[in-house]
Amino acid sequence: MARMVDLTIAGRTYQVACREGEEDNLRAAARLVDGKSREAVAGLGTLSEARQFLFASLLLADQLIENNPGTVAPEPPAPPPALDPKLVLQAESLADRLESLAIVLENETANS
């Protein structure tokens, strides 16, 4: 059954649900976020709530990467190169010719 836990982060209290037995881990996570949130405000000055959480999450991610370099997410793959329109037309023409040949072969096989 879900349990409600009050968490205070950056001076604001949030009610968050968790499973029974996870309360201590949730509170510990909230303390980490609160600490990084305060660190962000100390370094950057007044921030909106959203930006405060953004910078807190970035600081936590940076700390995680420093402690576990293997956790770095890979770069997204490069977008495929643009297709050459001339090659596309040639491939479509070839596909049409192959389809025509297949129809002819099917008709010859059916008539045999």
Image: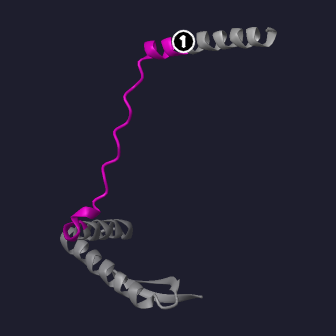
Q: Can I make out residue 26 in this image?
A: yes
Asked whether, in this view, residue 64 is left or right of residue 26, the answer is: left
Q: Is residue 28 magenta?
A: no
Left or right: where does residue 75 sit relative to residue 16?
left
Q: Residue at x 44, y 12 (%)?
A: 86
Residue 15: image location, x then y, percent:
49, 84
Q: How is the image coloured?
A: one colour
Viewer can see residue 12? no
Task: Report the front residue among 25 and 103.
Answer: 103
> Residue 31 location, x and y as percent?
32, 84
17 over 98 or under it: above or below: below
Q: Is residue 34 above or below residue 80?
A: below
Tell me which residue sits at (27%, 60%) in the image: 72
How packed mark 1 is, by other alpha carbons closer than 10 Å (few <14, some 14-19, many 20 or more), is few
Amino acid type at mark 1: Leu
Q: Which residues are magenta?
A: 65-92
81 with respect to 45 (left or right): right
